[in-house]
Image: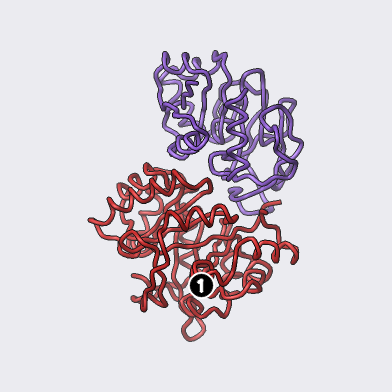
Amino acid sequence: MKVAIIKYNAGNIRSVVFALERCGVNAIVTDDAAEINSADKIIFPGVGEASSAMRYLQSKNLDKLIVDLKQPVLGICLGMQLMCNYSEEGKTKCLGIIDADVKQFIGGEKIPHVGWNTINQLNTNLFNGIAENEYVYFVHGFYVPLNSFSIATANYIVNYSCAVQNGNFYAVQFHPEKSATVGEKILNNFLSL
Amino acid sequence: MLAKRIIPCLDIKEGRTVKGVNFLNIRDAGDPVELAKIYSDDGADELVFLDISATNERRKALSALVAKIAKTINIPFTVGGGISKIDDVSVLLDAGADKISVNTSAVKNPDLISDLAKQFGSQCVVVAIDIKLEDGDWYVYLNGGSVKTNLLATDWASQAQQLGAGEILLTSMNNDGTKNGFAIDITKKISQSLSIPVIASGGAGKMEHFAGVFKHGFADAALAASVFHFKEIEIPELKKYLLSNKIPVRI
């Protein structure tokens, strides 16, 4: 199986590479259109700021490429937020794969949301074998509100959507690559889609 | 519900885990990769590695060690020790570290915090602060606790937050190594005045101390070293204890 991790200016993706190695897959990290299109599975990772990430994707024509992908795609963290219509972070238009607008956490608790939190209302094969209320690792200051594409929810200040799916596009707000055995199970589920 | 985090800290010297009291009587505590694996399998929520022998020659060896750790464990980890510029951080993040911690270099050059936050994001910038209580005030100390400054802990912690720190690792030198419990009051004061998470460190000796610093010190995470290395406290047992005291932890 060929797994491609989309390379762009968003954070450290080494931990995603290592996590996939632990799942028995040697992924390639690339921004080459042909390489990405020929992969069986694609991971769209990201830690960083939404508007600068969007600008970078546009400058490399990766925005159009991602939207047109037909194979299973997994967005992680910022990758999930960029799949939405719009983000309050840098007030940027995003890829429009998921019909939702990304909002900033405000008030009540420490921000960003950092650490291990539980996930609920799990749906689709991405969460095969994962129990309700399992803990996964989050680091984010912006969130995707509840929406009709939601396949998992979390609670921090508000109830929000921590995983979404639209057709072949899957995305999670948390970091499966840093979420111990639960995260590895989710990555393996994605690889088995 | 967001869980309180338990973080074992591994002091690294020349590739081995070591533990001493105030950097004296340093004892060997094992291979850091093996220990890291044991801790992550045991349910540690994160790990912190501090290279206490950090010099330029050692740094290459450290990044190789970081890569080994990153390949082995599946939880987040922070690396610190002797980091003073952006390039130091690039090397460690490229090797697979999730966060880095800065201490002395950030006090000497506060812009380092904002530079790192801009370049890599606040989420990976941990500002470690060593503090000591003197005449009723908590002062910031540098160079592994050997150099006193006139900075007050509360002032420096809020400045670090403003500059873009993602978390504060607060170590009380008065408590460190005593096993008499964490410095609850100053942890509470700083945790409640900041909007970023505070990791309490120094003084863990019993399971009650962890409960205390979460309940009364409002810490978001608690860090300890020797009680874990020498198996005086086992993480699964500690987490069961905390849960039975209604403190949310990941099991």
Q: Residue furthest bottom?
A: B135
Which subunit holds the residue at mark 1? Answer: B
* Vertical order, A146 against B79 (above or below): above
Can the viewer see residue A48?
no
Name the image quarter holding residue A91.
Answer: top right
Tell me, by letter, which chain the rendering colours purple.
A
Number of marks present in the image shown: 1
10 Å crowding of disc 1: few (<14), some (14-19), many (20+):
many
Rendering coords of residue A175 (x, y %): 57, 40
Left or right, B5 with reference to A122: left
Tell me, by letter, which chain the rendering colours red.
B
Rendering coords of residue B85 (x, y %): 31, 52
Rendering coords of residue B211 (x, y %): 67, 69
Amino acid at pointer 1: Gly
Question: What residue is at 54 percent from the left and 34 percent from the top?
Answer: A78
Question: What residue is at 60 percent from the left and 45 percent from the top?
Answer: A137
The C terminus of chain B sits in image quarter: bottom right
Rendering coords of residue B105 (x, y %): 33, 61
Question: What residue is at 50 percent from the left and 38 percent from the top?
Answer: A22
* Vertical order, B101 against A67 (above or below): below
* Vertical order, B144 against B83 (above or below): below
Left or right, A22 with reference to A83: left
Q: Secondary structure at mark 1?
A: loop
Left or right, B214 with reference to B231: right
Can the viewer see residue A123?
yes
Question: What residue is at 67 percent from the left and 25 percent from the top?
Answer: A165
| Colour theme | by chain
Determine which residue is flagged by label 1.
B202
Left or right, B88 with reference to A99: left
